[in-house]
Image (cartoon, grey):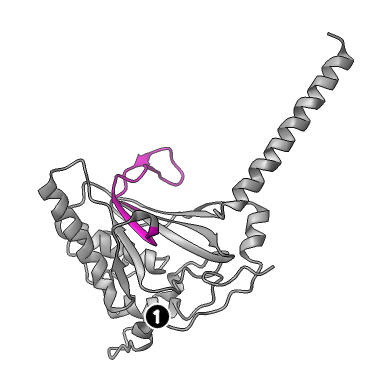
């Protein structure tokens, strides 16, 4: 086969592949799946390591409308801290679409019943997880749903992927992982969360892990430096309930601008 013929075949293949890639990209964007962020947490401490995957095109789509705040949910608007405990809002990380604020209520929560354990153990696991979750219902409206496809937040009994420690090649197990993804629905930017809870967590530690992770899923994308807060960055022997500082921080998050819940425009 001559060089000219080889060159023509090569160009034909390149053009075919390019057309298919453009078609695949169009289908990908059409699905509305935009960005995936991961909050990784180790077994002996909660360290946020955000990971994200996006393209310049998708990023510009997400930021095509200016972030702005939503009205405060009545449950948070009515909240008053009589103890003046302060907050840790400075530790909360924003994203390229603003703060991770929910604007449609109630927030729909699905807890997947485990199948790898007995029915009785599964019932206990779901009960403990729901206890940690429902503690937040005083501050934001929640509802438990039976269909995972309509859930805003899904909780699963599953070991999170191993975490590579920064600066080393050592893999570490983690007790929990919270991730979110952004998508569009009717040109409105939305998000949904998935929480993985390690099967090794039981009893009050499972309740504490659920409470902690759910705080992230409600919008507190950061950690407290104080052990007396539910969003403390590390596991402790005696886990704390939701504190006034946790709620103060949550309220400040919901006062911030976001692109979530708004039309993308254009």
Q: Is residue 233 visible?
A: no
Identify the residue position indicated by label 1 in the image: 251
198 relative to 7 in the view: left or right: left
Q: As drawn, is 34 to the left or to the right of 71?
A: right
**Residue visible at 40% across and 82% down in the picture:** 73
Dividing the picture into quadrants, the one containing residue 173 is top left
Which residue is most to the right?
Answer: 4
Residue 110: horizontal and vertical position, in percent?
A: 31, 58
The answer to whether residue 100 shows anywhere in this view is yes
Q: Which residues are magenta?
A: 150-178
What is the crowding at mark 1: few (fewer than 14 residues within 10 Å), some, or many (at least 20)?
A: many
Q: Magenta includes 240? A: no
Name the residue at the left extreme. 120
Total marks placed: 1
Q: Nearer the viewer, residue 172 or 251?
A: 251
Q: Quadrant of the N terminus?
A: top right
Q: Is residue 97 left or right of residue 116?
A: right
| Residue at 62%, 51% in the rendered image | 29
Q: Position of residue 88 (x, y in %)?
A: 39, 75
Q: From this viewpoint, which residue is outermost toward the top? A: 1
Residue at 20%, 61% in the rendered image: 207
Depth check: 238 or 70 in front?
70
Q: Secondary structure at mark 1?
A: helix
Percent of width and height locating residue 50: 48, 55
Q: Position of residue 89 (x, y in %)?
A: 43, 75
Q: Quadrant of the C terminus?
A: bottom right
Residue 152 covered by magenta stretch: yes
């Amino acid at each position: 086969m001559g060089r000219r013929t080889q060159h023509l075949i090569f160009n034909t293949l390149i053009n075919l592949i390019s057309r298919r890639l453009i078609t695949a990209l169009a289908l990908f964007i059409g699905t509305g799946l935009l960005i995936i962020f991961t909050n990784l947490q180790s077994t002996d401490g909660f360290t946020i390591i955000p990971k994200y995957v996006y393209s310049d095109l998708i990023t510009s789509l997400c930021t095509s409308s200016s972030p702005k705040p939503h009205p405060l949910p009545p449950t948070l608007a009515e909240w008053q801290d009589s103890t003046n405990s302060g907050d840790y809002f400075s530790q909360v990380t924003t994203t390229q679409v603003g703060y991770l604020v929910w604007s449609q209520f109630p927030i729909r929560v699905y807890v997947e019943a485990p199948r790898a354990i007995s029915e009785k153990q599964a019932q206990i696991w779901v009960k403990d997880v729901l206890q940690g979750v429902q503690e937040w219902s005083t501050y934001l409206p929640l509802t438990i749903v039976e269909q995972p496809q309509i859930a805003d937040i899904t909780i699963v009994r599953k070991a999170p992927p191993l975490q590579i420690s920064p600066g080393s090649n050592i893999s570490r197990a983690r007790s929990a992982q919270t991730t979110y993804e952004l998508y569009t629905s009717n040109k409105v930017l939305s998000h949904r969360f998935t929480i993985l809870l390690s099967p090794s967590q039981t009893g009050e530690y499972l309740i504490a892990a659920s409470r902690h992770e759910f705080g992230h899923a409600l919008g507190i994308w950061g950690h407290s430096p104080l052990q007396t807060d539910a969003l403390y960055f590390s596991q402790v022997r005696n886990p704390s309930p939701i504190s006034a500082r946790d709620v103060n921080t949550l309220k400040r998050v919901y006062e911030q601008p976001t692109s979530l819940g708004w039309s993308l425009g254009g």
